[in-house]
Amino acid sequence: MMTLEQLTQMAGVVCPMYVIADAKGRIVSAGPTLKKLRPQLNWEGRRFFRVFDLSRPRSVRSMEDLVRTSGSKLHLQFRDGPQTGLKGVCTPLPDGQGAFINLSFGISVLEAVRDYDLTSADFSPTDLTIEMLYLVEAKSAAMEASRQLNTRLQGAKIAAEEQAFTDTLTGLKNRRAMDHVLGRLINSGREFALMHLDLDYFKQVNDTMGHAAGDAVLQQAARIMVECTRQSDTVARVGGDEFVMILEGVLDTARLAVIAKRLIQRLEEPVPFGALTCRISASAGTTLSTWQKVPDAHQLLNQADLALYAAKRAGRAQHFFYREGMEKEEACSTGEAGQPHTAARGPAT
């Protein structure tokens, strides 16, 4: 007949979470994995129901009740924390010597592995838990790889969109971005000022000092415009030396005049380029979205453009606001010059 020692040795290999309790309910032996869950507990001699809280079957209150559940599924947990949930099955020992209870983690295996730092060596070699853990680990790795890929794709998408809306030389927004911002503001009903700025004497810099000097001037002009506007404003390069600024919520003409004056003063500061010094100025024209009953991006750009060229005709280095009648003034000036201006002209408002 098999001795208790032989039984525990065999059970420790085949089912490392076993418990053997005598007829009085005292623990005689426990498996190595179970002991790992409570390393400070002196298992031998402890009462089974002092270590475990049996929730089902509810009728079990004693060792005799437990033995009568032979073959039925048991639901229990540790009485002390962490109160890991366990599943079990009981079978009586011969001659009323007690019971052999084999335990497992059931669906709480992931929490158990985390809480107790378990490895494959803590489970029976034939336990499907090992395969499940491998599958969970593989799934976690696949999900992490998928998350990282999605993050990279999202980053690439954002970078591509940013590049599509950015002027590569100055780092400002480009015409496409300006059109997008104008459309968004108009569709949302938000009020804004639109300032069109053109660099004076820039062509002379390009023609006499070269395109590298012109690029340096454009980059310096872009920095000044960013410094003179808010982070919430939009500064876009829409042509060779033409810029548009969209200032959301700024409708005070006095404040806009101050901004334009400061811009022109800053842009007139000499720009060093090697041993040379580049000198430019700027002209600007501004209109407000509130000056149209129904704001239209094309008409707003046209109005700012008219005000800009009025400033240029007045002697450059100036800032004008759009006013009604500028369309006729522009038509007269271009008629006298014999060469009409190429900017689009919307209907007067």
Image (cartoon, rainbow, N blue to C red):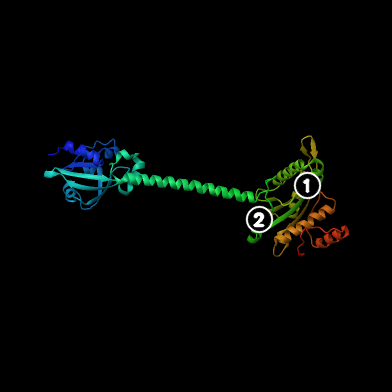
Q: Residue 10, image x and y in percent?
A: 21, 39
User: Is residue 23 visible in this depiction of the protein?
Assistant: no
Question: What is the x, y in percent for residue 137?
Answer: 39, 44
* 347 sits to left or right of 117: right
Q: Secondary structure at mark 2?
A: helix
Left or right of residue 131, residue 338 in this image: right
- Per the model, the C-alpha gap separating discs 2 and 1 is 24 Å
Q: Which residue is mark 1?
A: 264
149 or 101, which lies in front? 149
Residue under the point 23% across and 45% down:
102
Image quarter hosting the C terminus = bottom right
Q: Quadrant of residue 303?
A: bottom right
Q: SS for tag 1?
A: helix
Q: Position of residue 156 (x, y in %)?
A: 57, 48
Q: Quadrant of residue 187?
A: bottom right
Label 1 CA crowd tier, 10 Å (few <14, some 14–19, many 20+): many
Residue for badge 2: 181
